[in-house]
Every structure is written in C-alpha cells, then in structure tokens.
Amino acid sequence: MAKEFKGRVICKGNYTGECVVSRQGLNTLATFQKSALKNAKKIIGSDQNNPDVYGKNLTGVALILPQTIGSTTGGLVIQTVCQMGINPAALLFSEEIDSLAASGVILAKNWENSNIIAIDKLGSDILTQIKTGDIISISEDGTVSLVN
C-alpha cells in the first residue's frame, strides 16, 4: 500500500512529480533570494545553513518542509518567485503553515494567478517517510501519496 498523508488545503491543485524534503525550517529569503535577484530561470537553493535544499533545483518540484522561518519578507519572497514563474510546484508543510508563507501563497494565487499548491498539517512522518528525489502525487483534496 502506498504511503499517504492527508492535510489541510490552503491552495489546491494536482501534481505528480519529484519532491525535495527539508527536515528543518526553510528560510525563504536565504533559499530563494539569490536566484530571484539574478533573474534566474530556476531557483537553486542558496541557504548554506540548510543542507537539505542547498544547491538543489527547487523550481517545479514539491517542497516538503516543517514550516518557513526567517525574516518578515518571507511571504513577499514567495510571491515574487511565483510572479517570476520559478516557484516550487507545491509547498507541503508537516506542521501548520506559518502566517508569512500563507500570505505569500495566497497573494501569489490571487494576484499573480500562480498555480502553486499549498497544503499544511501533513504530520511529521512525511519528513521521514518521503525522501528527496521521490515521486509523489498531490490531489486537490489535500492527499499526498508516495508514487515510487
């Protein structure tokens, strides 16, 4: 039986593809800023303090994380990378989404017509049972399933 996790939908959508797992809080400014400032075609994780994402392509993948951390610019950074079209396909939170990330994905969805998916309250097991590079499937009802 496939591993499944059910969470609360913040921004719905369907996705099947690769994921990157950050087992620690994700600093959006440190992770996304360098790519955004360079007007890059994709986000390469630039937070040297987070080995789970550092140097990895984060554009178009499902990013699994406990929650975001860092400065109050976090929501704006998420909105900006969505506006640029280089955002992760999904932000999947093991814990409750923090207010800054929530504001970023909601603004991106409504102001930028972004297709970013956000689901929270998936539980801490998702951080250990799914690994970077795994293929997952996300359903509009908030179900995340391990495909491989």
Image (cartoon, rainbow, N blue to C red):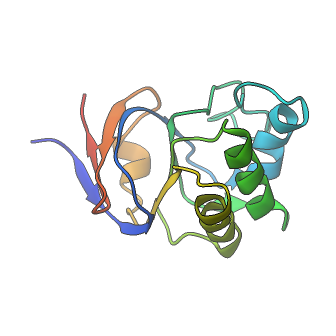
Relative to 57, is 30 above or below? below
Q: Name the residue at 79% across, 38% down.
A: 47
Q: x, y percentage for residue 83? A: 72, 47
Q: x, y percentage for residue 67? A: 60, 61
Relative to 61, is 65 above or below? below
Q: Nearer the viewer, residue 82 or 35?
A: 82
Q: Nearer the viewer, residue 29 or 16?
A: 16
Q: Quadrant of residue 43?
A: top right
Placement of the N terminus among the 4 image quadrants: top left
Relative to 115, is 97 above or below? below
Q: Is residue 145 left or right of residue 123?
A: left
Placement of the C terminus among the 4 image quadrants: top left
Q: Is residue 59 visible?
A: yes
Q: x, y percentage for residue 116? A: 53, 51
Q: Nearer the viewer, residue 30 or 59?
A: 59
Q: Is residue 26 left or right of residue 73?
A: left
Q: Quadrant of residue 6?
A: bottom left
Q: Name the residue at 40% across, 60% down.
A: 12
Q: Is residue 83 left or right of residue 146?
A: right
How many marks overall?
A: 0
Relative to 70, is 1 above or below? above
Q: Quadrant of residue 147?
A: top left
Q: Name the residue at 67% across, 66% down.
A: 107
Q: x, y percentage for residue 69? A: 73, 61
Q: Is residue 93 visible?
A: no
